[in-house]
Amino acid sequence: MKGFNLSVLSLCLVFTLTGCGDVQVDSVDSNAVDTYTGSYPIRSVATVGMVADIVRNVGGEYVAVEQLMGSGVDPHLYKTTRDDVQKIMSGDIVFYSGLMLEGKMGDTLIKVSRNKPVYAVTEEIDPNTLLEPAEFQGHYDPHVWMDVAVWIQCVDAVTSALAIFDPEHAEQYRVNAGPYRDKLKRLHAYGEKTIGSVPQGSRVLVTSHDAFNYFGRAYGLEVLGVQGISTESEAGLQRINALVDLIVEQGVKAVFVESSVPRKNIEALVDGAASRGHVIGIGGELFSDAMGETGTYEGTYEGMLDHNITVVSRALGGEAPKNGLNGKLNQSDDHQ
């Protein structure tokens, strides 16, 4: 399991939010992290829903999860609150995604790591499976959960971290991880089959920002975002006009809004295409940097990706069941 020791964290602090996710980290053995001696359940803290979902499934009855960022929250722009700091400080172990996703929360995570185990779940991902877009200036694209086959690697990272921290229940964590991995493998196969049914000429996915590059690579779609990988980047008129030209020329059937990003840029594309005589609709709302509402199927990682896969496939002319892989989606065929 790879973790953050103090020297690495100090280096990350020097390069605050510019490359911490790319630093090579020494492996942490069982002596590097104090083992848990308190009462159960262990109090774990997770930054975003996708990470929290792994911890809940692997931790089971022995781990309680406090999720900091809920549905509709953009982690790129999120500012750590006093309550967040208190929750992190009172937790026993902390998990975050990494690869610069959490942005401005980085300083807090660095400070806390001096006193308790803090793990980036993406640290064990094979670098050969990561994307490094030119526009991200030498850093990896952090939206790895969009490729289910890659995100599965993070299950191993969480399992290893919990086993090191709580060796008494290490075997149970490994047992819990098995069915969760199997579920995600089935989800990935559904994505390949369902989006594979979209006609070749219609495999263009236009969204609010470049959060879907892994999704496109995994399931054979050309992905175009109005904004860059981080929602901090501004979409200029030139970029919008260029996308309108492409939409009209290729006869794109639908564009998509995102649950955690304002929809004004996508609406500008719709209006621009209409002014050129090409009527295009909004194919639906996709989950990009945050999952759905807590307590719903879409509020789980499986439900989030099931929703995205199903909505995209149906909107672009593919074949997908109305209510998704498990028949649990609420409004998978609604165009916004």
Image (cartoon, rainbow, N blue to C red):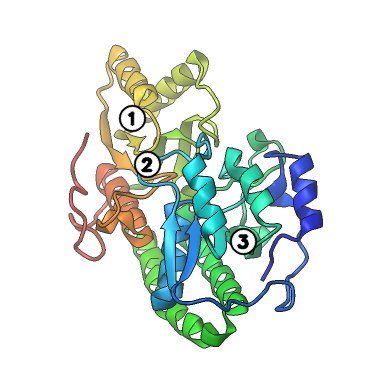
Q: Using the rendered view, name the quadrant where residue 54 is placed.
A: bottom left
Report crowding for label 2: few under 14, some 14 to 19, many 20 or more residues within 10 A (C-alpha): few
- The local crowd at label 3, few if under 14, some if 14 to 19, many if 20 or more residues have their Cα within 10 Å, is many
The image position of residue 196, as x and y in percent, is 36, 56
The local secondary structure at tag 1 comes to: loop
Report the residue marked by disc 1. 251
Q: Amino acid at mark 3?
A: Tyr
Name which residue lies at 26% across and 57% down. 295
Residue 133: give x, y in percent of width and height: 63, 41
Q: Is residue 278 left or right of residue 289?
A: left
Give the residue drawn at x 55%, y 35%: 230
Residue 119: image tag: 3
Q: Nearer the viewer, mark 2 or mark 3?
A: 3
Q: Are marks 1 and 3 in contact (CB under 8 Å)?
A: no
Q: Are marks 1 and 2 in contact (CB under 8 Å)?
A: yes
Q: Name the residue type under label 2.
A: Gly
Q: Which mark, residue 201? A: 2
Query: Is residue 183 something one can see in this rendering?
Result: yes
Q: Which residue is painted at 68% across and 50% down in the image?
A: 110
Image position, residue 250 (x, y; %)? 38, 30
- Which label's residue is closer to the chain start, 2 or 3? 3
Where residue 326 appears, as percent x and y from the top left, is: 23, 66
**Which is nearer the N-term, disc 1 or disc 2?**
2
State the residue in front, 45 or 307: 45
Q: Is residue 143 something that shows in the picture?
A: no
Of the residues under marks 1 and 3, which one precedes in the sequence?
3
- SS class of the residue under badge 3? strand
Which tag is nearer the camera, tag 1 or tag 3?
Answer: 3
Q: Tag 2's secondary structure? A: helix
Seen in the picture, residue 175 relative to 262 is either above or below; the reply is below
- Residues at marks 1 and 2, CA–CA distance in whole angstroms: 9 Å
